[in-house]
Amino acid sequence: MVDNWRDVIRNARALAVENIQKKQRQQKQNYDESHRHIDFQVGDQVKVFFPIRKVGRSEKLFLRNTGPHTVMEKVSDVNYRIRFSGDNRRLKEDVVHVSRILPWKNRH
């Protein structure tokens, strides 16, 4: 009887591992289909997303993307060193993840 339960548990575990691997492959495929690769060059002008939250104020009217800032270095595939423009920034340079960076488009 104990051997029978061991077989049942082993089979259930094998099935669970197989299902997890199948779902992981499906999720990777879905991500790869909708992912857009963004690559910036040193010297590119970009705008950077800064989440702004103030107590008692609505966030929807705050300017969250600031710029133009300059790409100084590509630290890794997803991180860039950005030099911030403007005198009001505490940070002069910082490493920023690519998900917070958008290309700067001059509207003039």
Image (cartoon, helix red, strand yellow):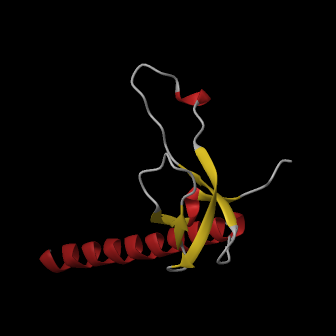
Viewer-proximal residue among 33 and 89: 89
The N terminus - image quarter: bottom left
Decide which of 105, 22 is in the foreground and name it: 105
- Asked if residue 45 is positioned above or below residue 22 in the image, the reply reads above
At which x and y percent is residue 39? Answer: 67, 74
**Residue 22 at x, y percent in the picture:** 53, 73
Give the total of numbered labels. Answer: 0
Which residue sits at x=57%, y=42%? 64
Query: Left of 5 or right of it: where is 69?
Result: right
Figure check: 55 above or below 14: above
Above or below: residue 88 compared with residue 97: above
Identified at 33% across, 71% down, the residue is 12
Name the outermost residue toward the top: 56
Residue drawn at x 57%, y 60% is 99
Left of 58 or right of it: where is 45? right
Most distant residue in the left direction: 2
User: Which picture quadrant has residue 74?
Assistant: bottom right
Is 5 rendered above or below residue 69?
below
In the picture as drawn, the residue positioned furthest to the right comes out as: 108
Looking at the image, which residue is at 42% across and 19% down? 56
Position of 58 compared to 1: left or right? right
